[in-house]
Amino acid sequence: MSSARDGGSDGLEKVSSPPPLAPPTSEGTRLCWLRLLRSRRVGTATFYRLMAEHGGDAEAALDALPTVAAKAGLSGYAPCPEGVAAAELAAGRRAGAQPVFIGEPGYPDLLRQISDAPPMLWALGDPAIASRPAIALVGARNASSLGRRAARHLATGIGAAGYVIASGLARGIDAVAHETALATGTIAVVAGGVDVIYPRENAALTAQIAESGLILSEMPPGLRPLARHFPRRNRIVSGLSAAVVVVEAAARSGTLITAREALDQGREVLAVPGHPFDARAAGCNMLIRDGATLVRGPEDVLEALAAPGLFSAPRPAAPRPPQQMPPAAITPRPATPPSPGDDAPIRVRILSLLGMAPLPEDQLLRDLDLNSQDIAGELLEMEMDGTIHRQPGGLLARSA
């Protein structure tokens, strides 16, 4: 599988790796970089090609762009207007974010090395976190109770070893990983603008990450994510990480896109095994079958990274106090209606947490934040209609 990708659809020749570029050193050159990047049909690969052809001079590349477009059959082509790029820079800074261009100190070093590294990222939060080694922890949005516990255990151990936890700020495993790693360091890579809340139920978590962690995006501030943005988000999650650990994933899921990106980028891929009859574990079991490292706990992840030729382990990091951010750093802009949460029917919430692997009933009650009287009747009905079955020792599981 080729690792060269382009965000545009210009059909121009792709480059295999980004050429070394001196980062912009003035507001004028930053504006030119952004104008070139946001110009119609200029994707990541085309950006690097144009910059290489013009000696890293973004202004010269902009001047040449209409001619290049005309040769490609586009008449009347005009680059991104200066006012549009200036408005994006102003909007990002109003949100409390900073633009970080490739080659600048705040740009993640591992991400810089991938073939389709974003020429610019918007960063909201603590920029120092980007300089620390990271491990991606990703998984199912409809995570089971066991999956959530596994993610929490892994994030705690990996964070205590000094690694930052990177993920995509989705519901489920991503959210659990970020929340657990707030004290030791976490990076959330989002598919829309850094100031856009998605999904809406993660609004409080997003604000916490903006205060004590780091939110990254290659998209303009204010942009609501679309389906096509998520695969590009995924390649940043894996690209800035030394390894990708998958906790619950269906056989056809966005999480496996992240794993494939990691393999293309030469990253270590690890997975937590699951019950063979649980659809949420099918992707993890497939990855392990195909050679991914099996993970039982954080020790397995750290051992894999300590193998010769891989990345050196960081020093354990002490928990950091939250940074104070401007009150307006996050403006809630829900991209879609929220998924069923605490107000969903109890049966729906129970099924979202139960899998084929047995779960103690008291753990289910804690996850639901309910007492036994609140769900006793519902559990009995689900047992009677065969939706779930009870095992010795107070264990509950979904029926096959």
Image (cartoon, grey):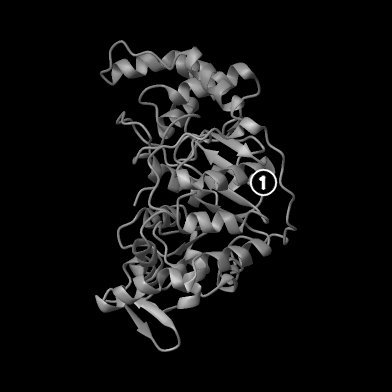
Residue at image point 60% right, 68% down: 302
> Which quadrant would residue 113 be assigned to in this image?
top right
Image position of 84 (left or right of 252): right
At mark 1, the secondary structure is helix
Amino acid, disc 1: Ser
Which residue is rendered at x = 37% and y = 22% of the image? 40
Question: Can you name the residue that lies furthest to the bottom here?
Answer: 392
Left or right of 9 in this view: 130:
right
- Could you tell me which quadrant the C terminus lies in? bottom left
Which residue bears the numbered disc 1? 212
Q: Position of residue 307 (x, y in %)?
A: 59, 69
| Number of marks in picture | 1
Question: Residue 374, image x and y in percent?
Answer: 44, 68
Front in this rendered view, residue 129 or 338: 338
Q: Residue at x 68, y 55 (%)?
A: 183
- Residue 265 place in picture, x, y as percent: 46, 52
Tell me if residue 322 can be seen: yes
- From the viewer's perspective, is residue 27 above or below residue 337? above
Q: Position of residue 258 (x, y in %)?
A: 42, 53
Lateral position of residue 253 relative to residue 182, left or right: left
Residue 293, can we see it?
A: no
Vertically, is 103 above or below 24?
Answer: below
In the rendered image, which quarter is residue 253 located in?
A: bottom left
Q: Nearer the viewer, residue 363 or 197?
A: 363
**Which residue is at 31% across, 63% downward?**
251
Q: Residues within 10 Å of mark 1 (few under 14, many from 20)?
A: many
